[in-house]
């Protein structure tokens, strides 16, 4: 499954996760809240950009099933990368996840 095809899961995952980052709980901006700018888009103050993340990375045996997807802010997704599972990342973050 290509990254572009993850897009079809965004509404379901975002609704399930309450439009908050699954890890840090920061509010994720919805598409209609995005603000056009010269660099592309920005988000309103207090919101962050969202991404779809694999709780268990494919590199660690995870799959592309809905249950393995979470809504994540760009910062948490970058920190977690494909090096950590959800539980490993939770431990690294001091259990704050």
Image (cartoon, rainbow, N blue to C red):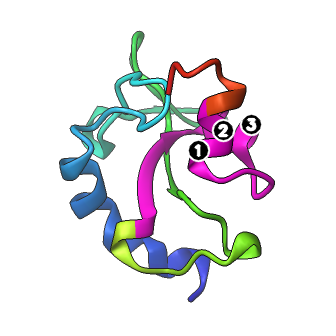
Relative placement, left or right, of 18 versus 76 is: left
Residue at the image point whose x is 67% and y is 78% from the top: 61
Alpha carbon of mark 2 to alpha carbon of mark 1: how far?
A: 5 Å
Number of numbered discs: 3
Q: Which residue is mark 1?
A: 87
Alpha carbon of mark 3 to alpha carbon of mark 1: how far?
A: 14 Å
Relative placement, left or right, of 39 versus 14 is: right
Alpha carbon of mark 2 to alpha carbon of mark 3: how far?
A: 9 Å
Tags 2 and 1 in contact by the CB under 8 Å rule? yes
Relative placement, left or right, of 84 versus 50 is: right
Q: Is residue 75 magenta?
A: yes
* Element assignment for label 3: helix
* Element assignment for label 2: helix
* Element assignment for label 1: helix
Residue at the image point whose x is 55% and y is 22% from the top: 95
Residue 6: x percent and y percent? 46, 73
Residue count near mark 1 (Cα–Cα under 10 Å), binned few <14, some 14–19, many ≥20: few
Q: Which residue is mark 2?
A: 89
Is 11 located above or below residue 44 in the figure?
below
**Residue farthest to the bottom, as pictured:** 1
Residue 67: x percent and y percent? 35, 68
Is 27 located above or below residue 84 in the figure?
above
Query: Which of the two marks, 2 or 3, is nearer to us in this view?
Result: 2
Q: Which residue is mark 3?
A: 79
**Front-most of residues 93 and 78:** 93
Residue 24: x percent and y percent? 48, 24
Magenta segment, which residues?
A: 68-90
């Amino acid at each position: 499954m290509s990254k572009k095809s993850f897009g079809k899961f965004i509404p379901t995952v975002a609704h399930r996760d309450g439009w908050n980052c699954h890890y840090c709980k920061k509010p994720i901006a919805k598409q209609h809240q995005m603000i056009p700018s010269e660099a592309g888009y920005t988000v309103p103050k207090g919101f962050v950009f969202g991404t779809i993340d694999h709780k268990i990375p494919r590199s660690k045996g995870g799959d592309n099933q809905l249950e393995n997807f979470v809504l994540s802010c760009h910062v948490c997704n970058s920190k977690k990368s494909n090096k950590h599972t959800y539980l490993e990342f939770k431990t690294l973050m001091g259990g704050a996840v």
